[in-house]
Amino acid sequence: MFENLSERLGRTLKNLRGQGRLSEDNIKDTLREVRMALLEADVALPVVKEFIERVRERAVGHEVLQSLTPGQALVKVVHDELVHIMGEANDELQLNVQPPAVVLMAGLQGSGKTTSTAKLARWLKERRRKSVMVTSCDVYRPAAIEQLRTLAGEVDVAFFPSQADQDPVAIAQAALDAARRQHVDVLIVDTAGRLHIDADMMQEIQRLHAVVNPVETLFVVDSMTGQDAANTARAFHDALPLTGVVLTKTDGDARGGAALSIRSITGKPIKFLGVGEKTAALEPFHPDRVASRILGMGDVLSLVEEAHQQVDQDKAVKLARKLQKGKGFDLEDFRDQLQQMLSMGGMSSLLDKLPGVANLPKGVKEQANDRDLHRMVAVINSMTPQERRHPDIIKASRRKRIATGSGTQVQDVNKLLKQFMQMQKMMKKMSKGGMAKMMRGLKGRMPTGLPF
């Protein structure tokens, strides 16, 4: 997300950082470039105008022009104003009511409501330690109810059943009664979408809202619709008292215009970002962190939080003890590391949060893809347990068999074994001289044991 905007803004602001002095003229040229970058990112025109005006007011003032590093000072102004238009801080779900707290999911058909319902249920269960029940009031879309039933089983939360011939309002009322009886903390109600906004749809969801009286009414919208996302959100806001927005499919949106427009147009905060297809791919929206990502400063805080949540702490401790005892790092350990990386969103998600990655050549970023990680895991899975623990026995005939079993080429097996040996050397350095010694050995380079 924001790839195009980040690249354009980074290039524009980089030219200013090296200048010892700024004038109104070069600030004017820079703001013209920033304006074009925002419009290309499909940010709504009124939002762009307000943003540029606010930056201009601060940029030509004492704060920037008299700074010792005026280029960096202007970058800070742009960062602060990005945070301002997206909301000053993360707006958390307000669930401090008598249980069950009801969350109503609204949006157009195809926006990702049902998947987002399951993602949110998992997030509440794992991050907030809440007991969750989900139900579907979508009696129009074929298989919508069954889809939510399947997803509820996958994330291990309660599912209140419904039928296509039932009244959506009756479903919601029955689900609420069941949630009360079972002392559930949160009930998430998935509603029907339409291909466009229509009066019948709005009336039905208004009736649902009146019956369940939700503490949170979340508008789910596809980020790739750009400005239309913000306009649709405004139409829903006119009909419903929305409390927030869930922006979906952001992993496929290189522009990011919706994220920059929604808050200004609707006045409602983005609460979550859908960053992938898996049920774990949901992130709380932090405007300051997103602004840092846009400007190529990375998002280390989110990276640390993800590592804490997704990395298997027991496996990490076992590996550390194993290395301390002088036992070798084998292919099973390597596979665990690759799988942990995938569980954190894969290479693209990790790179997106690392400072300075926006400045890497495009070819380098394109090399870092999850296909390589999945291929490497497949190759290791095709080995026997003995081969994984003793890689030195993998000679030509075994390599051919492993390649056939994993649907890859012998060259892929050779490449994996080479990368594994490099990682093994790194781990050996860690066990003997600690992290500091390993970092000195790298001399600031990326570890070549990783697949990019």
Image (cartoon, helix red, strand yellow):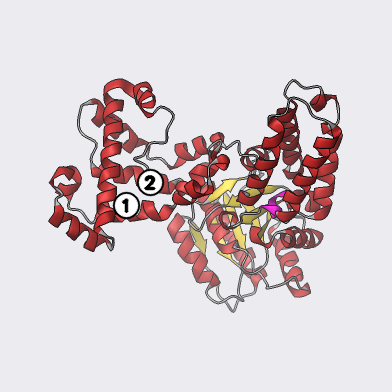
Q: Nearer the viewer, residue 2 or 106?
A: 2
Q: Which residue is mark 1?
A: 376
Q: Is residue 43 magenta?
A: no
**Which comes sooner in the sequence, label 2 or label 1?**
1
Q: Is residue 257 magenta?
A: yes
Q: Nearer the viewer, residue 273 or 1?
A: 1
- Relative to 95, 331 lies left or right: left
Q: Nearer the viewer, mark 2 or mark 1?
A: 2
Residue appearing at x 75%, y 57% in the figure: 230
- Residue 132 to residue 288: above or below: below
Residue appearing at x 63%, y 64% in the figure: 111
Marks 2 and 1 sit apart, C-alpha to C-alpha, by 9 Å
Task: Report the disc number at residue 451.
Answer: 2
Give x and y (percent) for residue 40: 72, 55
Residue appearing at x 31%, y 52% in the figure: 377
Task: Report the disc number at residue 352.
Answer: none
Give x and y (percent) for residue 2: 63, 49
Quarter-of-image position of residue 133: bottom right
- Relative to 97, 383 lies left or right: left
Quarter-of-image position of residue 176: bottom right
Give x and y (percent) for residue 43: 75, 53
Which quadrant does the C terminus fall into?
top left
- Relative to 237, 255 lies left or right: left
Question: Secondary structure beneath disc 1?
Answer: helix
Magenta region, residue range: 256-260
Kind of residue at badge 2:
Pro
Kind of residue at badge 1:
Met
Q: Which residue lies most toward the bottom here? A: 165
The answer to whether the residue labelled 2 contacts the one labelled 1, judged by CB atoms less than 8 Å apart, is yes
